[in-house]
Amino acid sequence: MAPLEDLERDYPIIDSNFRMFCASHGIFTDTDFLLHDLSALEAFARQDYAPDKLEQGIKQMISIIESGQRPWLNGVELLEDSQLNKCTLSTGCEGIDILLQGGLREGHVTELVGPSCSARNSLGKVVYFDTGNSFSPKRVAQFLSLLSDPSATQTNKAVERDMSSIVCHSVFDIFTLLDMLRQLMNNLRSQISFQVRMLIIDSLSSLIAPVLGGGGAHGHALMATAGFLLKEIAHESNLCVVVTNHMVAGEAGMLKPALGESWKSIPHVRLLLSGKYSATGTRITILKHPYLASGKSADFVVL
Amino acid sequence: MTSAFSWIAADETAEQALVRIYKKRPFLIFPPPFHRLPLRAGNVVEIVGPSPSAKTLILIQAAINCILPKEWKGVSYGGLERAVLFIDLDCRFDVSSISRALQRRIIDANGLRRSSLKGNGNEYDKELFVSSMRRFLYTRCYNSFEFLATLKTLHHRIQQEKGGSAVYMLLIDSIGAFYWMDRALPTSSTGNNNNRKSLSLQTVVETVVQEIQRLLVAHPMLVLATKSAAFGDKQSITEVIRKRPDEKMPDPRDAQNKPHRCFMPSVWQSFVSHRMLLRALDGESKHQNRPTFSTEWLLPPLNCSDHFTVNDGCLLIPK
């Protein structure tokens, strides 16, 4: 929401005369310009005493808006981008990979829902936003050592290297989360930080659930803002974003995922984990996916 | 004198006008689920349903029907061979869904048997696929202002596409995507000085409707918009209804009982010319493990509903 004065530096046609004309119609920032009827504005400009300069100013504003936009892509370009940039990351568990046709996809926001004590925390690596102090380095090291080749003598060093590629941050409220996400987006855009492949937010619901509810719209707005930020990060920087959610009581005593109806339309993929955290295996079911049928499930065992 | 009379002279008769309109903007019957009502350019169709229902899938099927040609190398596809514009406001679109559906459609129309999508099911006309995919134009917006900016510059973009006569459909995925963020927009605290338009959901939606109306005048298109809906009454979080085991629990998604609540401002509701409602059905198809949905036209209200199932990204109409 930039005021029009800031644009004068780069575009001298937006001079004080033009700004006064805009102010007389109630336009002070570029968002005001978007809300206004442009053809009516042009008609007013033509009746002014200096019509040419004003019309040029309006055209300049339109071209500024156009240049700040994302380009339109056609289907072929979309496919190319998808094949080049958005590969699938394996979850480390064969059953889940087969179910998801390769694994977790970059560019998608995947939600894992399950009652507590299911296997939610056992999948995943790299940037980890921990909201409940449940991240345990020992557990991750144990997991990694099981995955790597047990006969290798360099196991310790490999585990260390893998552990150092995981960056863990503790986040305890939604505003810090939004702040860190914006910072991450800026870093990724300017490519300051290392190559991030995956972002995990353990228990996004524990950050959002306290602000939902009540009569105001701010809780839902924060949830929607966080959701769109995650989607933007996932798509523009080709990351795989994984968030976790818990279950709450629904109608007739059945469990349903938390965060309500408005959250349902935010993640790309929703996976439900059910069953006790036991040796007999946990079941993972697809609740929602862009192109796989929902209802498919697979079993896996957590070691 | 002659110039004054020419002002009130008739341009054309009503018959000529009707013939001209039906030729320029013909009524078309689209494949299911739109088969009950003819639609034409200038109509605004809203597809309402809870999440998840197959709303985006319906948009994709409509897009495929539009981008395929009528006939290609002797095989009839029944398409319109026109471009579609897809504005993704939900930002969840995956191009694999449309590419798979298009491949399946081309293969089915050619009558080739396909055993699986990979492997030997791959013999389809790649040239046709590429030329059709080129007619699918896509952009995404992460907030309302990007959406407004896209709409304002759309006229110019359509002109670039083969002189502007080629685009037939405008698909908007989830018109209500920014509803909560717009409701929480900061309104100006200094009051209504200098007749400045206050930032609010109302002004944003009014501008969106205005821009789309202006676009439709210049480029007549069919507009399909999806919207996610909430059904029934909000249930309090602390209230858990306990039922005795023998008492029959009324199906919370019972079609006749709970009307859907429309949350968009009235300026959008009056802009919409057709409205279709989707509901998920439980029950008889559970053993097949395929979700079933029912569609019903709310505007204009028809008293019948159709059913369809989703099979791996494809709509099937069994009943």
Image (tube, coloured by chain):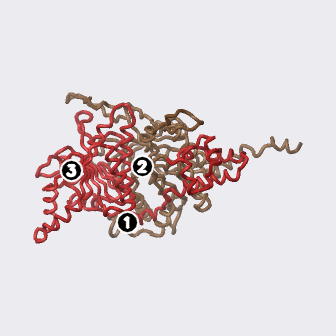
Chain colours: A red, B brown
The residue that mark 3 highlights is A120
Q: Is residue B154 visible?
A: no
Please tell me which residue is depicted at 44% across the width and 65% down the height of the picture. Answer: B110
Q: Is residue B46 visible?
A: yes
User: What is the x, y in percent for residue A243?
Assistant: 28, 50
Which amino acid, by three-letter code, is at mark 1? Gln
Query: Quick one: label 1 or label 3, which is nearer the N terminus?
Result: 1
Q: CA distance from mark 2 to mark 3?
A: 26 Å
Q: Which mark is residue B90?
A: 2
* Chain of the residue under label 1: A
- On screen, residue A299 versus residue B121, left or right, reads left
Q: Quick one: quadrant of the C terminus of chain A?
A: bottom left
Which amino acid, by three-letter code, is at mark 3? Arg
* Chain of the residue under label 3: A
Q: CA distance from mark 1 to mark 3?
A: 29 Å
Q: Specify whether disc 1 shares its chain with disc 2.
A: no
Q: Secondary structure at mark 1?
A: helix
Q: CA distance from mark 1 to mark 2?
A: 22 Å
